[in-house]
Amino acid sequence: MNETGVGIGDIGIYVPSLQMNVNSLIEFRGRTQPQLNHLMTKAAKKTGQISFRFPSPWEDTATLAANAASEILERLSAGQQERIRYVLVGTETAVDFAKPVASYVHGMLKKAGYSLGSALSTYDTKHACAGGTFALLSTASNLRCSGANQERGLVISSDIARYEAPSTAEFTQGGGSAALIVEKNPRLMEINLGTQGVFSSDVDDFFRPLDSVTARVKGRYSMDCYQSALKAAFEDYCNRAEQSPSQCIDTVDYIALHVPFPAMPEIALRRLLNDSCEKNKTEIEHFMRRSGFIDAMYLCKFFGNLYTASLYIYLAALLHQEYHRIGDKIIGRRVLIASYGSGNTMIVFSGHICENAPKTISRWDIERWRGGSRNAGFNEYLAWLSNPTGADALQNRFEAPDSKKGLFYLKGLSESGYRIYDRG
């Protein structure tokens, strides 16, 4: 019996408008702590980051997710929205210890008039930056078992990346969300659920204690963990596919990796091609060029580290880039996806680009994703870093003048601390 394919039908993106330029941050820090100038300049060059986005006072993980979701729901009819059976959020920056972000998002979307029913499942998935991938694969697997071809899932990767400041890790902060429609007979990319490579190990390269809003990271060690996890999961994938690593890489057209900052996946991929696939320098450079791997960083290098959303921001940028480069020839191209989560895990799987992908991609407003930013002042940035937790302090920030037109936002907190959301 031929099974119906399952995969990604559409992608929507939302990032906050506030933008911090890396060079501006170095200049700001240098005024009060000139001893950091050299270290921060060196770190900026190594990361390849140009700027990053951070949320306004009225934005949190849930509002970022709802705003990304609304973009793709607008491209579905009311009847199609009613067939959504799963609303899942992958995140490592949840807003509540008990209630999932997915539940808040479901409530916001219904209140805003989208035709989501109540006969659906909502929950969050977490494993650092791989949480969104677990949500995607879980939803795709559930839909594959369903007898109803029109059922869909809404999977959202949403996060706010924060680090101790001042530090060189400030460049790898960011915030934003990527929403995916998961469906049978997908319009964009069909996923091969039958062959996955996996790796997990309990390490302390990256973690965030329950009483902290900032992550703890061991930079060099975390990069080593990323690279070793990619190698192990990729080789596991090749074993399951009954191919050598060299054969496997020669049969894919594109590779999408998690992007904490642009230099990290590039270093990891070059090492993988050399160590596992036994490619020489000329062959590696050829692969980098033909796959458009580095050029597709054009959103990530301006948005910053979006944790769970980074991989899918990169995937959207890659597909958009390649569609505008080769047009309908993108149909049938194979994509290898490797999703990393610190602490740590790696999942490698593949997909192929579907017949209706050109039509879907052509509807993406890439300039709106890339534009709409406003260079933030240092005081705005410091206000975000201060992270007030008291209800009164937060309320003052909610009421600060800002443009919320058409956007979901955090309106305030009840006396008991319950989060209240609305749409401008």
Image: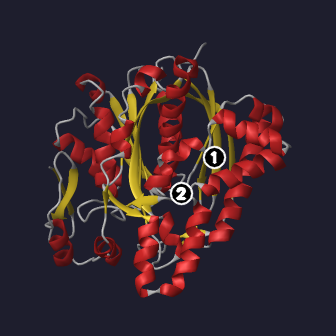
Total marks placed: 2
Q: Left of 212 or right of it: where is 197?
A: right
Residue 99, located in which quarter of the rendered image?
bottom left
Residue appearing at x 73%, y 44% in the figure: 234
As displayed, is residue 120 above or below residue 325? below
Where residue 344 sits in the image (x, y, percent)? 63, 60
As displayed, is residue 73 above or below residue 48? above
Q: Quadrant of the N terminus?
A: top right
Report the front residue among 2 and 413.
Answer: 413
Q: Amino acid at mark 2?
A: His
Whether residue 214 is visible, yes or no, is no
Q: Left of 323 or right of it: where is 266?
A: right
As displayed, is residue 284 above or below residue 57? above
CA gap between label 1 and label 2 equals 11 Å
Q: Which residue is mark 1?
A: 347
Secondary structure of the residue carrying tag 1 is strand
Residue appearing at x 55%, y 41% in the figure: 296
Disc ID at residue 19: none
Q: Amino acid at mark 1?
A: Ile
Q: Are marks 1 and 2 in contact (CB under 8 Å)?
A: no
Give the residue at the far top of this rendering.
1
As displayed, is residue 268 above or below residue 145? below
Q: Which residue is mark 2?
A: 127
Report the front residue among 20 and 98.
Answer: 20
The local crowd at label 2, few if under 14, some if 14 to 19, many if 20 or more residues have their Cα within 10 Å, is many
Where residue 141 sits in the image (x, y, percent)? 53, 33
Residue appearing at x 62%, y 37% in the figure: 292
Residue 342, located in which quarter of the rendered image?
bottom right
Where residue 382 sits in the image (x, y, percent)? 33, 76
Secondary structure of the residue carrying tag 2 is loop
**Colour scheme employed for the rendering of this structure:** secondary structure
Where residue 24 sits in the image (x, y, percent)? 41, 69
